[in-house]
Amino acid sequence: MDILTTAYGLVIGYILPFLFVLTIVVFFHELGHFLVARWCNVKVDAFSVGFGRELIGKTDKQGTRWKLSLIPLGGYVKFAGDENAASVPDRDRVAAMSAEERETAFIAKPVWQRAAVVAAGPFANFLLAIAIFAFIFLTFGKTVTTPVVDSVQPDSAAEIGGLMPGDVVLSVDGRKIETFNELQRIVSASADVPLVLEVGRGNAVETLTVTPQYREITDNFGNRQRIGLLGVTRSIEQDDLIHKEFGPLEAVAEGTKDTFYVAGRTLDYIWGVISGREAADQLGGPIRVAQVSGQVATQGIVPLLSLAAILSISIGLINLMPIPMLDGGHLVFYAAEAVRGKPLSERVQDIGFRIGLGIVLLLMVFATWNDVIHLSRL
């Protein structure tokens, strides 16, 4: 009975939220490829959510096989003329096609159409994130607090910089601050970076320079992350709480702003890893995503949808990396083709795909190793 109870808890608590989040993100990514391919008159042989053996499927009138596959860790759209799910061209198959069949083969399309089809996947991820955030804002609004400092921790960056309880943060580096959430976002991304704050203190306006300290924090679920901290707490008085309602256009604008923020923070972290400023142990794989999905699901549907939006942005950005096998690698090949006036040689492309496959596999192994280490510390 204990084993059954544990298995049931894993399925309900972790696996189902994980599949819910990942399926939404993967489906819309592949749908972006699919819709633009159809618009460019490219025949789509298969649309799969998941890899491996087909579990269920159906073929539509255009000959596309829609299917749900065994391994739910991604998906693919396979075009006519492709050798595999990574859109590596099957040149022998293309050579054997009739003139009519070749007209709908992906490899036979102009370079700009192929680039549009490939770019549509990550673009769809960003649109999905905007749509999810906009839906949340339109349906539930947003409760924020005014940027009022309630308390200052001893020996913190805030105390060193001269912040005092009761101060109202008006701007950071000339950027107007309206909520404490905006202040948190800037500070968390600015560890060891001096910030110029204008604060309201009584009837006067003071200008202070503070440098957020680099700190590792642990959330309510035991997950650790390193961010910049000032060492202040916000006021939670009723007068300092603001509930914002959004119309459709305002919700889309706010969703777009949040999408750009998440994308910027993700790129900043990636650059930090490359430059050595950030540790790579925050990179996670499927195990971490499943764990976080289960944790977030306990807080309700809104946090779970927010996680789907964040994951969608991350997958969109990852796919734009200039690594062969990923969408960004294909776009690099197409850019070279556009400049040269002809495709790169088959040998160069094959070598590129092999290198890309090696990089992707190494990243997967590294991310999974990070997941295992992370779980061992909980």
Image (spheres, rainbow, N blue to C red):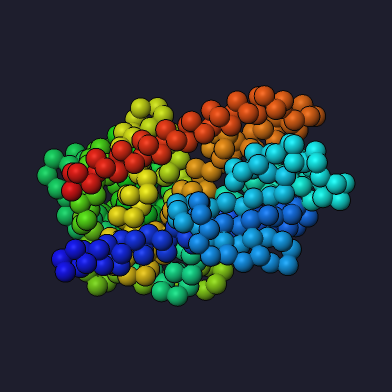
Indicate whether 295 appears above or below 186. Answer: below
Whether residue 163 is visible to the viewer of this picture, yes or no, is: no
Q: Residue at x 73, y 67 (%)?
A: 61
Nearer the observer, 156 or 208: 156
Q: Residue at x 32, y 45 (%)?
A: 188
Nearer the observer, 64 or 240: 64
Quarter of image, res 187: top left
Indicate whether 172 appears above or below 369. Answer: below
Nearer the observer, 369 or 254: 369
Q: Residue at x 35, y 52 (%)?
A: 289
Quarter of image, res 60: bottom right
**Can you give x and y, in whole percent of width and height, for residue 55 in the image?**
50, 62
Tell me the quarter of the image containing the N terminus.
Answer: bottom left
Nearer the observer, 177 or 56: 56
Q: Residue at x 35, y 44 (%)?
A: 284
**Relative to residue 99, is residue 149 drawn left or right?**
left
Residue at the farthest right position? 99
Whether residue 8 is visible to the viewer of this picture, yes or no, is: yes
